[in-house]
Amino acid sequence: MSTQDRVAWRRTLQSETDMNYQERIVRDPRVVGGEPVLKGTRVTLRTVLASLAEGATVADILADFPTLSEEDVRAAIAFAAASAQEDLPVAETPVKR
């Protein structure tokens, strides 16, 4: 991936993570032992991300957790994207020749 492609990819990621997920994800030691949850619910961030990783659609998650909104699921995705962007180096992709 060229430097220009990497810059474009990071800009795309940034625009997707511009959502202020911090307004929707909260920690309270009195709720689910202090695990991050979607605000106003007892649904953990881990549960939403695990469901997505297992192939659940947003509609599936909303059906399973009616207290959530589509924006809550997007906030979970934005949190994961921001975390990955901060914690993981961008791996070089070998160029086939």
Image (spheres, rainbow, N blue to C red):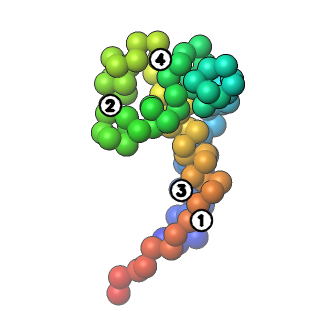
Secondary structure under badge 4?
loop
Left or right of 47: which side holds 26?
right
Image coordinates of residue 15 in percent, x first then y, are 59, 41
Which of the two labelled residues, at mark 1 and mark 2, occupies the earlier sequence position?
2
Q: Alpha-carbon neighbours of circle 4 within 10 Å: few (<14), some, or many (≥20)?
A: some
- Real-space CA distance between mark 2 and mark 4, rounded to the nearest whole angstrom: 13 Å
Which of the two labelled residues, at mark 2 and mark 4, occupies the earlier sequence position?
2
**Residue 9 disc label:** 3
Q: Nearer the viewer, mark 3 or mark 4?
A: 4
Whether residues under marks 4 and 1 lie with C-beta atoms below 8 angstroms apart, the answer is no
Along the line of sight, which residue is nearer the eye, 66 or 32?
32
Secondary structure under badge 1?
loop
Whether residues under marks 3 and 2 lie with C-beta atoms below 8 angstroms apart, the answer is no
Which of the two labelled residues, at mark 3 and mark 4, occupies the earlier sequence position?
3
Which residue is painted at 45% across and 73% down in the image?
Answer: 93
Tag 2: amino acid: Thr
Image coordinates of residue 88 in percent, x first then y, are 59, 60
Secondary structure under badge 3?
helix
Tag 3: amino acid: Trp
**Residue 57 disc label:** 2
Q: Nearer the viewer, mark 3 or mark 2?
A: 2
Which of the two labelled residues, at mark 4 and mark 1, occupies the earlier sequence position?
4
Q: Quadrant of the C terminus?
A: bottom left
**Residue 89 disc label:** 1
Q: Which residue is mark 4?
A: 68
* Numbered-mark total: 4
Which residue is painted at 55% across and 46% down in the image?
Answer: 81
- Real-space CA distance between mark 4 and mark 1, rounded to the nearest whole angstrom: 32 Å
- Real-space CA distance between mark 1 and mark 2, rounded to the nearest whole angstrom: 28 Å
Whether residues under marks 3 and 4 lie with C-beta atoms below 8 angstroms apart, the answer is no
- Real-space CA distance between mark 3 and mark 2, rounded to the nearest whole angstrom: 24 Å
Tag 1: amino acid: Pro
